[in-house]
Image: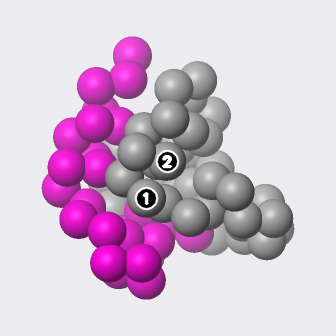
Amino acid sequence: MFTKESTYQEVIAKEDAYKILAKHGVPCVSCPMAKYEMGKLKLGDISEMYGIDLKPLLEDLNKIK
């Protein structure tokens, strides 16, 4: 289960995560610098930095099997 403490690296390990991140406007999907910070970037931090509503993002991510 994903939470605000889940790292970007944990999230993108799931196959459909990129689509969901893009749907919610997470710019890290196409950011070349993200690959250097994947293990440190947490969903809560990303959503706060970019003004993304964390609750629906987590709901969608947690539907991934």
Residue numbers of the magenta segment: 41-65
**Which residue carries the number 1 mark?**
25
| Left or right position of 28 against 44 | right
- Residue 44 position, x and y percent, is 36, 69
Q: Amino acid at mark 2?
A: Ala
Q: Residue at x 35, y 37 (%)?
A: 61
Dominant secondary-structure state across the stretch colored magenta? helix
The residue nearer to you, when weighing 38 against 21, is 21
Marks 1 and 2 in Cβ contact (< 8 Å): yes
Question: What is the x, y in percent for residue 25?
Answer: 43, 58
**How has the structure been colored for display?**
one colour
Is the residue 45 above or below the residue 19 in the image? Answer: below
Q: Is residue 52 magenta?
A: yes
- Specify whether residue 1 is in view: no
Q: Quadrant of residue 18?
A: top right
User: Does the magenta run of residues contain 60?
Assistant: yes
Q: Which residue is mark 2?
A: 22
Q: Amino acid at mark 1?
A: Gly
Q: Report how many numbered discs are placed on residues in the image.
A: 2
In the rendering, which numbered label is found on residue 3? none
Q: Secondary structure at mark 2?
A: helix
The C terminus is located in which quarter? top left
Which residue occupies 48% across, 60% down? Answer: 26
Q: Categorize mark 2 by other alpha carbons within 10 Å: few (<14), some (14-19), many (20+).
A: few
